[in-house]
Amino acid sequence: MPPPPPQEQQQPQPHRPQEGRPRPPPPTPPPPMAFSDDMVAFYDAWVGREEQIVADLTAALALPPRRQRDALPPLVGAAVDHVAAYYEHKARLADRDVVAALDPRWLNPLERTFLWAWGWKPALVFRFVEGAGVGMATAQRRALEDLRAATAAAEREVDREVAAVQESLAGPRVLAALRRQAPRNGEADDAVAVVGRSLRVLLGAADALRERTLRGVVGLLAPDQAGAFLAAMLRFHLGVRRAGRDWSPGHGGQLGV
């Protein structure tokens, strides 16, 4: 009697998810306001560091000249890096939410009166060179005037670009997209997205001009001159910050952020 045929081994079946099992929802992105709140917290801490930088510069400027030569260069570098850190943090905010970056709610009402292209006007820094009473050689003055002229030309270019973006915001496609209650097909309209990208580039260009002008002025000055200039500039900003923070409705303004 022949042996029974061998039983076929059953191959393991690949695991298949059960039909109809709900998939986990995609992670919920943080609300746009969270990005702005992060900038508010950063700015408060940043202003606190600025107060210490001004105190350090003031103390170093009171030292004898020989000791100033050792104390001031690192403090000047720290002050410039401090200003650059603000632009870097704001750039990260703009990458995540350009609208929040264009509405600097971390600034109080008085600080907002100084806004040009969503920040301080670059040419303003030249006033602090004069206000600090920095004595300069003829060659320094000539170089400073060249930098001032180049900055003014760059400001005019930014003004033209801001005007162009404002005109594009009033274009028919953008207006039609803004009037719709819901985005078409669940996505932002291309026209609005293009304007948003233009605003991001323009904001970056304006902040780059601000930082470039500051570094250019510092590069033309000796350490004691740069220290006096930076102390005057940062001291002015802190004064504006304090005055705006203490602004009250009784003075015709509103309380600061």
Image: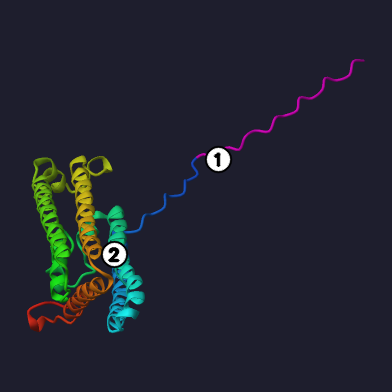
Residue 17, disc: 1
Which element is circle 1 on?
Answer: loop
User: Quick one: 165 or 21, which is closer to the camera?
Assistant: 165
Disc nearer the start of the sequence (2/1) = 1
Quadrant in the picture for residue 194: top left
In the displayed structure, 164 sits above or below 84; it is above
Number of marks drawn = 2
User: Quick one: 36 or 165, which is closer to the camera?
Assistant: 165
Q: Position of residue 236 (x, y in %)?
A: 18, 76
Look at mark 2 in the image and give the residue it sits on: 86
Q: Amino acid at mark 1?
A: Pro
- In the shown orientation, is residue 217 left or right of residue 3? left
User: Quick one: 33 or 56, which is closer to the camera?
Assistant: 56
- Whether the magenta-drawn stretch holds residue 76 is answered as no
Which element is circle 2 on?
Answer: helix
> In 3D space, how far apart are the residues under numbered discs 2 and 1 (Cα atoms)?
49 Å
Question: In the rendered view of the protein, which quadrant contains the N terminus?
Answer: top right
The chosen color scheme is rainbow
- Whether the magenta-drawn stretch holds residue 17 is answered as yes
Quadrant in the picture for residue 90: bottom left
The span picked out in magenta is 1-19
Residue drawn at point x = 54 percent, y = 41 percent = 18
Quadrant in the picture for residue 173: top left
User: Quick one: 57 or 42, which is closer to the camera?
Assistant: 57
Q: Amino acid at mark 2?
A: Tyr
Camera sees residue 141: yes
Residue drawn at point x = 23 percent, y = 58 percent = 212
Camera sees residue 116: no
Q: Position of residue 113 (x, y in %)?
A: 11, 69
